[in-house]
Image (spheres, helix red, strand yellow):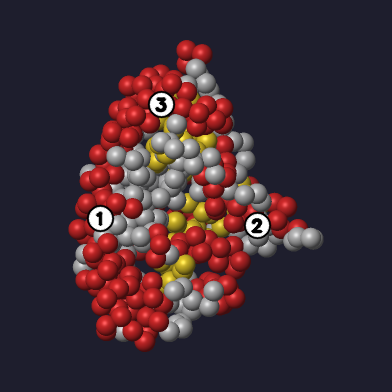
Amino acid sequence: MQFADRLDNVETSAIRELFKLLGKPGIISFAGGFPDSAMFDVDGIREAVNTALTEEAGGALQYGATEGYNPLREQLARFMTDKGASDVAPENLIVTTGSQQALDLLGKALISPGDKVFVEGPTFLATIQCFRLYGAELVSAPIDGEGVKVDELEALIAEHRPKFIYLIPTFGNPSGATLNLERRKKVLELAVKYQTLVIEDDPYGDLYFGAAPPPSLLNLSASVPGSRELLVHCGSLSKVLSPGLRVGWMIAPAELLAKATMCKQFSDAHTSTFAQATAAQYLKAGRMPATLAKVRAVYAERAQAMGQALRRELGDAIEFTQPQGGLFIWARLTGAGGKVGDGNVLAKRAIEKGVAFVPGAPFFCANPDHATLRLSFATADVAKIEEGVARLAQAL
């Protein structure tokens, strides 16, 4: 078959390929980027389903508007307002089939072949694949433990004049890094100074341990004149409620929302109205705060356990910053004491010892750091985390 030229620029997900190796009995996986299914509020979701089918069966089971099921748009606008975003109305957002569809719609609506697009180094693997599929020339913006380095970001903007900048400012995937308040304001100021669109992807911002993170770029945009018109905010219920619902949303300037809606019409007509009605009833019932409190406590305990185990079992052969939220620990092998210093090599040896993680190299759009790796603490309990890290030390 003769396939589209655009497929020459992408390859299958390294993570999805890794999953093919996880069928070995007894393996402990730190590889997935998904929440623990034991954390799902099954009773609350069941109640929301029943209410949707009782009170609004026609709307829940029928075709719907591409922009989204209006009761859900209203609930999401309220959800965002409660988190500190000002002036978010239902018409300011569209519902997407997971926040990943929002990225695809942005690629379709914004990227022409050869356009320069900035992403963090490292960043969400699917973003790299998606934007490359539409012909983007990706430029890596360096980060540290406090997010993107804004001085270097400005130099890159001045040099390349990107079509847009894609950031995960809060508990990034894979880095776990959180952009500090000063840098957040600077990003918005740079957007205005250079008239450059910024995309804020925020699927993890509600999963904080202890103190809440700095306000989102969306929340801060009210204090930086002109920045709201240059900002897209993508959200999701996947990490806090259920990935299976596939409910995400995108808040963007009206002109861009209209183009994204048109592109969505070509893709799936609309996100499942049944899923949207369920999510709307769940949010309306007011169960989300209790759900978030529960998952924050569980993930905080697991993150702490993994950090302690890594320091105890691997010592100076690994370095990392303890995450304050999200689902991941991003680490770097030092090679100390003659131990393995390559994440890809360690990943293969780890599978043989019965533990899995994702090597870090695929998360870079350029100049990959092969010593890095991503470990998820979300789906294993404390006992499994400690056993898995002990196996990792054996592989090292």
Q: Residue furthest top?
A: 337
Cα distance in 3D space between marks 3 and 2: 37 Å
Give above or below for 246 relative to 302. below
The percent position of residue 244, horizontal first and vertical second, equals 40, 62
For image coordinates 79% across by 61% down, the residue present is 2
Hey, which quadrant is residue 266 in on the image?
Answer: bottom right
Left or right, residue 319 beside residue 11: left
Q: In the drawing, what numbered circle is on residue 263?
A: none
The residue tagged 2 is 133
Q: Reading the chain from its start, which is encountered first: label 1 or label 3?
A: 1
Residue that carries the numbered disc 1 in the rendered image: 292
As helix, strand or loop, the secondary structure at mark 1 comes to helix
Do the residues bearing badges 1 and 3 touch, measured as CB atoms within 8 Å? no
- Residue 114 point in image, percent of width and height: 70, 56
Q: Position of residue 171 (x, y in %)?
A: 38, 46
Precedes in sequence: disc 1 or disc 2: 2
Q: Which residue is mark 3?
A: 391
The amino acid beneath tag 2 is Leu
- Please rate how many residues cluster around mark 2, counting C-alpha atoms within 10 Å: few if below 14, some from 14 to 19, many from 20: many
The label nearer to you, 3 versus 2, is 3
Categorize mark 3 by other alpha carbons within 10 Å: few (<14), some (14-19), many (20+): many
Residue at point 33%, 53% (across, down): 37
Front position in the image: 61 or 218: 61
